[in-house]
Amino acid sequence: MTEENKHCYIKEGKLALPYQYFAGRIGSKFLVSLRDKKKILGVKCEKCGKVFIPPRKTCERCFEDISEKWVELSNEGEVTNFTVVRTDDKHHPRKAPYVLAMIKLGGADTPIAHILGGVDPDSVKIGMKVKAVFADKAVNTMLQIDRFEPVN
Amino acid sequence: MIKFSKQQLKIPKMMRPVYLVTGGMSEFRRAFPEKRTEELCVEALTMAAEMINMSPAELKSYIHTCYYGHFADHFGDQLLGESVIHDRLGLDPLGNIGVKTGGATGGSTLWEAVKAVASGYSDCALALGWERMDEVPTDEGNHLISCAADKDWETPLGHIYTGYYAVMAQKYWQVYGKSEDSFRKTMAEIAVKNRGYAYHNPFAQGGMKITVEDVLKSPVVAYPLRALDACLMSVGSACCIVADEKTAFKMCKNPLLVYVAAGTHTLRPADRRDMEIPLLPNETKNTYKDLDKRFPGGELYPGFTGFLAARMACYYAYRMAGVYDPCEDLDLVELHDAFTISDIQSYEDVGIRPYGEGRTYVESGDCYVTNPKTGKPGKLPANPSGGLIGCMHAVGATGLMQVCELMLQIWGRHAEVHGDAKRWKSFGKTKPKDWKDLQVKGAKRGLAISHAGVGSHVTATILVDPKHQLKGGKA
């Protein structure tokens, strides 16, 4: 420490950000279905045929209101891509190493991001068949699906 | 003292005229637990398309770049919310950028979109803004918004803007208010007017039939400002689409010329250096030569009493559009009435009245759609939407909402949109039996002021019916 900055004052601060997350009507139906029925829902635009997961109210291409066009997707899908998280961080949902994967469910057009567990990270392969494992308790976020695990 | 160089006082030049093609809004409320932000933005864009008889997909096919206004992204654990909205509107992979200038975010977003078209970079650009202020309680919201004040020296004294405006109000009425009681009532009249106008606006959050006494009896937040002197905290979205002349007339029959200019001043209400008053086109040095005698203290400009940023925005914008006297050349204004006091201060900054005489704009009845003193049309109606006090202050959307309202007025479509019983019903409301048409008859030109902090950023937007351009207008 130099003579010049010896007397520079440092004050600890903390900006608290308590907030609520409003899932909205569409997001709520999706989360409640995961929680209460262990079913993964998407919405389908009848005009262009795209199945959206997570669901949304409006097809961004056709601007059709698709909020009532629910379709049930399979709880199983395949890994389209993945990485292994190898650093620990208090903000991570799992201890390292864990697998973060892109998973395309049966009936969906696009993959979702999720955690892949119950498997040695070094043996994960693209194309691997996986199934959803639901949380026992109410979580009310995407982690209502606790993780995916390999089928068998 | 701020001294301007010649270069700094250059009147902003647009390489080609820019037109407002259309605009749209969602409903505004304190809370929308049933809707994600993206849904409100879809509603705004959908209304913009409907206004010019297009499908949203067709309207989108014209858009080349996108400017998004969203201020408080620290509220809800989502930085770069602009990208989320851009994705949900299906506008990827077009270029987009987020704009953030506090309360003036909406106006600044339009400023950027207009420049994109004026420069020739884009033929059509989207300016869309929103705010989500319902995921925190009001006190947390006030606290988090005031993170935009000066952290080094002022926010430790109170994390709420009403406090900062209250000291400005105290100073203003000591210098210009003269007689406290009557000035206090004049301030209250603005709150009554704007909440009253909002009562007839289906998009509005805070329509109320109240009296001056109600305002004066409402709880004091920071003396002399009371709860009903303050604007609303809102959720909602608004958008404007701008284009060059050829594209604009292809998209709709009656696009409106649009001019935007901006100014700034310190974040702080305190420690403002005195300077000469920058003059608007209809003012001379003589206008203010005896200001110190008429209003002792008023010569210390801008002090706590004026918003230099608003003055500079109008300094540029009036000369761009050819406005000489706003009261004569404009037909209506949508001002940023964050507080009743700042509304009065703004009348002077934007030249509706000379410095010191802002209150007379209200007291004469000139600011009403129908002058209550004469029963005739007001000289220059202010905030028929209800403004921030009556309609909404969904920060990133506010400046765009104002421009949408001006657009409807100049198009003569105010009643078609505001008086549509189906629209009221779609918002879960009933059109009031005593609904009043607040169309400003024959409106051709309007001004919107978008304002941040205690005057840190201000934009002035002028809309002009191209058949009624002013001489000297640069387009």
Image (cartoon, coloured by chain):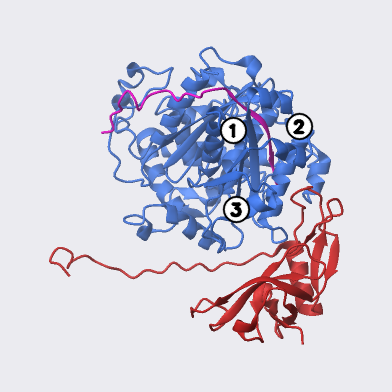
Chain colours: A red, B blue
Q: x, y percentage for residue A109?
A: 77, 62
Residue at 34% in and 70% down: A12
User: Mark 3, residues whose alpha carbon is within 10 Å: few (<14), some, or many (≥20)?
Assistant: some
Residue at 44% in and 48% down: B224
User: Mark 1, residues whose alpha carbon is within 10 Å: few (<14), some, or many (≥20)?
Assistant: many
- Chain ID, mark 1: B
Q: Is residue B138 left or right of residue A34?
A: left
Along the line of sight, the residue nearer the viewer: B178 or A1: A1
Observer able to see residue B326: yes
Q: Mark 1 highlights which residue?
A: B122
Tell me, yes or no, whether dots 2 and 1 are on the same chain.
yes
Look at label 3 and name its amino acid: Ser
Q: Which residues are magenta?
A: B1-27
The quadrant the N terminus of chain B occupies is top left
Observer able to see residue B196: no
For marks 3 and 1, give the one nearer the viewer. 1
Q: CA distance from mark 3 to mark 1?
A: 20 Å
Cβ atoms under marks 2 and 1 closer than 8 Å: no
Look at label 1 and name its amino acid: Ser
Q: x, y percentage for residue B320?
A: 49, 22
- Chain ID, mark 2: B
Asked whether B21 falls inside the magenta stretch, the response is yes
Mark 2 or mark 1, which has the lower sequence index? 2
Q: Mark 2 highlights which residue?
A: B52
Tell me, yes or no, whether dots 2 and 3 are on the same chain.
yes
Q: Mark 3 highlights which residue?
A: B83
Q: x, y percentage for residue B435?
A: 76, 37
Asked whether B461 falls inside the magenta stretch, the response is no
Q: Does residue B36 sit above or below B367 in this rendering?
A: below
Q: What is the quadrant of residue B404 in the picture? A: top right
